Amino acid sequence: MFLYKWIGVGSLTDEYEKFFIYSIFHIPVAFLTAILSFHIFFERFYNSKNKAVFWMYIIATSLFFVLAKRAFGYFYFDPQYFSKESADESFFSIPKLLLELFSLYLMVGMYGMIYFIGRWNKQQQALVILNEEKAKSELNLLKYQVHPHFLFNMLNNIYSTAIIKSPETANQILNLSNFIEYNLYHSKKELVPLSEEFEYLNNFIELQKIRLGDKLNVEIELPEDADKVYIQPLLLLPVIENSVKHGVEKSIRNSWIKIKIDINTEHNELTIEVSNSTEEPIINSDVVEKGGMGLDNLKKQLKLYYPDKHLLNILKEESVFKIVLKIIYHNHV
């Protein structure tokens, strides 16, 4: 655009100096407007709870730079190169201000087209990578594990026998059976109710209690309206797995995990806070800095399924490891 305005337009009238002066001011102003509009205001405020903040910044930026362009033309450029034509014009001439507005956003619009094409391309690349990872996982399941449908059916048969001889064992089998059933059928859905996701997580926790015994104590605060909130299936499992792996398993004393859910129906905001006791110093470990492999996978899922609609914080307090996840949820399928 700089070369076009300077050399291209200037060559029509041989007024290269005039259009060089024009370009050296107007092109950087348009570029700065585009940077602020897309990389600052759009990325930070467009998907926020209050879009009025975004539009307030956009309008304020437009007014500022349109008036700046008009001031440059009125006080310097027009008197220098169009002295006779502009002598009687007002600073707030509507035609001039509209001309400055359209010339500014013609260039900003061109930049925006490139910006959104690049943004779409990144999302497509992320989707391809996630699908490849999912395909590899499914292939490994088929290659190295017992067919899950067969295992699920066998567990149901064993449960019917065990419920008579050992109710406690039958209950453990039921938890495992429900856990496998969810992985088989419900995990393939696009969205599941939060209450259903927590039934699955509860089965996982009960299975961990079989392995860890009284060492594991879990408290869950789940609101009554959790069935009206829909999220991606298996989204929260890495968080619970992380608490068990890096908190309970590495502890020599009895440990605890607390899961607190808060639902803000006014803004469709779901807050999930998972904290666990810990004994070893992990403030400089990969668990805090990177979150481990499980939480790394969670970050990828959040980036794909909740772009610009989530906030994940990993915190280390004294003897407590905490993960706080906020997402803008779905209230219907």
Image (cartoon, grey):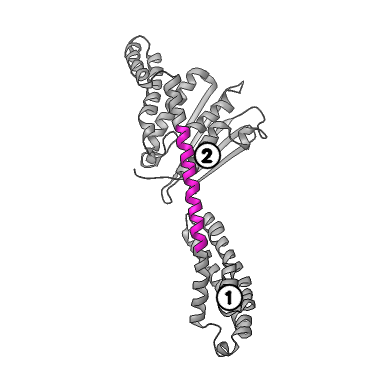
Question: Where is residue 186 shown, x and y percent of the image?
Answer: 36, 32
The residue mark sitting in front, 1 or 2, is: 1
User: Camera-side residue: 74 or 260?
Assistant: 74
Residue 134 image position (x, y, % from top left): 45, 32
134 vs 208: above or below: below
Q: In this rendering, is residue 181 above or below 223?
A: above
Mark 1 or 2 closer to N-term?
A: 1
Question: For mark 2, does the 10 Å Cα neighbourhood hold few (<14), some (14 to 19), or many (20 or more) residues?
Answer: some
Q: Residue furthest top?
A: 165
Q: Main secondary structure of the magenta part?
A: helix
Nearer to the camera, 249 or 121: 121
Magenta-drawn stretch contains 133: yes
Q: Are marks 1 and 2 in contact (CB under 8 Å)?
A: no
Of the 4 image quadrants, the one containing the N terminus is bottom right
Task: Give 41 or 223, whichever is nearer the viewer.
Answer: 41
**Image position of 171 (left or right of 125):** left
* Number of on-image labels: 2
**Which type of secondary structure does the marked residue at label 2 adopt?**
helix
The amino acid type found where label 2 is placed reads Lys
Amino acid bearing label 1: Ser
Q: Which residue is mark 2?
A: 299
Q: Is residue 195 left or right of residue 255?
A: left
What is the span of residues highlighted in magenta in the rendered image? Answer: 110-134
Question: Residue beneath label 1, please?
Answer: 11
Q: Residue at x 47, y 57 (%)?
A: 50
Residue 58, image x and y in percent? 52, 65
Which quarter of the picture shows residue 61?
bottom right
| Quarter of the picture holding the C terminus | top left
Residue 307 in view, yes or no? no
